[in-house]
Amino acid sequence: MAKELKELTKRSDNYSQWYNDLVVKANLAEQSAVRGCMVIKPYGYAIWENIQAQLDKMFKATGAQNAYFPLLIPKNFLSREAEHVKGFAKECAVVTHYRLKASEGGNSVEIDPTAKLEEELIIRPTSETIIWNTYRNWIHSWRDLPLMCNQWCNVMRWEMRTRPFLRTAEFLWQEGHTAHATREEAEEEARKMLDVYVEFAEKWLAIPVVQGVKSEHERFAGALDTYTIEAMMQDGKALQSGTSHFLGQNFAKSFDVTFLNKDNKPEYVWATSWGLSTRLIGALIMTHSDDNGLVLPPKIAPIQVVVIPIFKGDEQLYEISQKLKPVINELREAGITVKFDDADNKRPGFKFSDYELKGVPVRLAMGGRDLENNTIEIMRRDTLEKENLSFDGIVQRVKDLLVNVQENIYQKAKKFRDARIYECDDYEEFKTRIKDGGFFLCHWDGTPETEEKIKEETQATIRCVPFMFEQTEGIDMVSGKPSKQRVLLARAY
Amino acid sequence: MAKELKELTKRSDNYSQWYNDLVVKANLAEQSAVRGCMVIKPYGYAIWENIQAQLDKMFKATGAQNAYFPLLIPKNFLSREAEHVKGFAKECAVVTHYRLKASEGGNSVEIDPTAKLEEELIIRPTSETIIWNTYRNWIHSWRDLPLMCNQWCNVMRWEMRTRPFLRTAEFLWQEGHTAHATREEAEEEARKMLDVYVEFAEKWLAIPVVQGVKSEHERFAGALDTYTIEAMMQDGKALQSGTSHFLGQNFAKSFDVTFLNKDNKPEYVWATSWGLSTRLIGALIMTHSDDNGLVLPPKIAPIQVVVIPIFKGDEQLYEISQKLKPVINELREAGITVKFDDADNKRPGFKFSDYELKGVPVRLAMGGRDLENNTIEIMRRDTLEKENLSFDGIVQRVKDLLVNVQENIYQKAKKFRDARIYECDDYEEFKTRIKDGGFFLCHWDGTPETEEKIKEETQATIRCVPFMFEQTEGIDMVSGKPSKQRVLLARAY
């Protein structure tokens, strides 16, 4: 492992390779035998479990309930909403048969041609269609509204170029689907869930995000508005980290979902959907980590504190362990996840590197001299700063440090990002500067033609019309036409 | 709902219909648009979440970690283990294409024939094959063992006759997959996980189970031994509620997974797998519930206590609510899930029936007279007994009652079951009595021929060789040949 660590590519040498290396070496995930699908290893999955646990609480606090809808969707459902099918048909995995049989000779299996489905089924790329087909039977009157369901599940989009966490054929996510009596309420819900995503990204993952609304071209297939949170990675590229959609009455109309309003008249239901996926783990890696490995925010780290005794022989190990035990217990009682690593087949230096690679926020180490002096060594992963402290009061010190690391990595990421948000009014300048990454606030005339031209010539896309900056009118930097607002342009993952 | 409740079929009229009714009327699940696949509704899913939360803790306490492996499995993987493919090939959903395109005319979509997969992929019916293919790269030396992963996921088995929870094409489950250095350790692990299942079924779900080992014919496809827990439903039929398999070296050999032992010699790895699914919710329903609806064990109920104010007008509601608030808060602080239902558009009688239907273990109700008298009504769902109690000390009373209900429904189910476990040595008698249900302990000569004959003639199967009864030698009731043990025979779901 110490050897493997050495081989982690430096970010400055090849950012993309550094990312791929780190995912594998930190034991987060690996490619599987199935094209584009990854295995999420226990350490990576533990991060996902922590993400789930916190988000799930936040969703439930808004009144959403979890449910489960089928993996497979009848092919014809997809066609019902015209934009939706355009968006997803090209990347659907299709189930055509429901049985295999022994092939002649008997050494392998082949499709049983007599077991062909009458109608093909697709593996859900997202579940609006099957859920709205179900909601039709659940919603009759205004009293049944709002209806707010979330599901944690796997989805599949047959992407041609995949990268672990960032873009995989199968991924894990949550998808919320809500139904409302009025347009206003649905719009408010879509914005409220975006706020939940913002809070989660910033307070828990320590990732500063820009909130905004997508251009028509970048909208979710079937939405009237897509709200997004966009994070900046260390290479200055954007990563869309969560989206919330105001779907209007599109799916209600496609699946005939109406309710009787208070005047007893039928109306179509208003909808939202909102989703966030294992992609977020990619964002987490690329926002905070460094050439030594992962840097994880304490609030989401599977191991928050690692405690390493440095010992020669069982007797010294026993003494050090006895000294450390009350501290470990006290930390655990405070809800902190502590790993005590007294394995005797790995040297302390190896362990240090390994937990740095894994991004454990705080490390405590104690050796024979510490025992004599009543001291302990504490290291913070974010800055790699070490201190030798009095053993007394160490519990409070660790608690404070965890809070401090959480805040520090957020501020560091925010400072990094804020220094790379530029206003730009000159397209030639833009074309040059975009190569170095960053978020560009530029005037846009609102036409898809300009948007397309920028994308073709610079690979930058309109990430959103951001909410966080005051909007002024101006002149589109490409077309020279009038513009109502600046949009956020960036190259993106 | 009161009306719907009335329409719940009586168990004595039609047990099967009662079950189907109850699943729908208690809002647990419903059929989806996809054959054999159900929608698990929020109330049903909340039960599953509680099952997951508790089991997950128990798994982690044994050292297992969660991970995630791909949904899709290359077809050829299935063929590698000869028994495994026989067991699952006939019920596999097969993905053959990865893209749809607009059909001519443009109103629908059809398969894009140019997007045919080189090798078909199957939707996992269980994940031994893809996991052991992955373990090959994770296991090198004895130091990498034991390796214990669990995953919570969906699986698919194309069953022809389906029933909600009991048998569905898609279902949710957990599957644990462990790798060990020795045969003994793997066998111990398989038994240990069976113990976890027993503890969970009995202590949490209040379902008494018979533990045992399956006959060769009933084993998991690819296992050397399958351990099982078998529960008795109210109609006397058995329901297999969880299985743990000792897989020997079968999958290690099929996927070439070896490790260097302490003598630095390569050996094949020893394996187990163990799984428990949403089927358990069916067991829960059919063990405890009655003609009024669900009866849920307090430890797993989504709502443990419902509090219903009985009021005329806002002022009285306010007074009653103020009186109840400290009680509700105190219960919640003790970790009890309380629903306070002050909806004014439903009458108390309707609410009472509704929460009975939903199986809420304890109901508190308070009206104007209670307010005057400092009393409160408490009802327990299992016996439907009501009491009018002094308001003082009600919190402790509720806590005690929850414990009491949990224990009582377990004892009731156990008494019911124990009264229906029979020793039987006469096949003619067996053929008659099996029609009324029950578990029969009968001598069996150990041959598949006898097993098959019994199944054909009586629809009863060998559920297991049970661990809980002392074994004596005897004479097979069918063949008259010598028998080493009594086995548990029953008709089963």
Image (spheres, coloured by chain):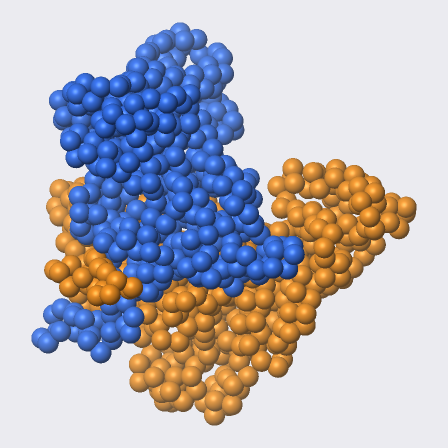
Chain colours: A blue, B orange
The residue depicted at 20 percent of the width and 74 percent of the height is: A112
- In which quadrant will I find the C terminus of chain B? bottom left
Q: Is residue A215 above or below residue B415?
A: above
The residue depicted at 42 percent of the width and 53 percent of the height is: A250
The residue depicted at 57 percent of the width and 60 percent of the height is: A266
Outermost residue on the bottom side: it is: B428
Compared across the picture, whether B24 is left or right of B326 comes to left
Out of B174 and A318, give the one closest to the viewer.
Answer: B174
Q: Position of residue B231 (x, y in %)?
A: 50, 68
Outermost residue on the front side: it is: A481
Outermost residue on the left side: it is: A105
Out of A201 and A381, give the one closest to the viewer.
Answer: A201
Out of B275 and B296, give the one closest to the viewer.
Answer: B296
Residue A362: image quadrant is: top left
Compared across the picture, whether A373 is left or right of B383 comes to left
Is residue A231 visible in the rendered image? The answer is no
Q: Position of residue A415 (x, y in %)?
A: 34, 15
Residue A53: image quadrant is: top left
Compared across the picture, whether A198 is left or right of A379 comes to right
Q: Is residue B337 above or below residue B87?
A: above
Compared across the picture, whether B187 is left or right of B350 comes to left
Tally of marks: 0
Q: Position of residue B435 (x, y in %)?
A: 52, 86
Q: Is residue B445 above or below residue B402?
A: below
Residue B208: image quadrant is: bottom right
The residue depicted at 30 percent of the width and 30 percent of the height is: A445
- In which quadrant will I find the N terminus of chain B? bottom right
Q: Is residue A484 above or below residue A122?
A: above
Outermost residue on the right side: it is: B372
Is residue B100 visible in the rendered image? The answer is yes
Out of A289 and B138, give the one closest to the viewer.
Answer: A289
Q: Position of residue A196 (x, y in %)?
A: 47, 34
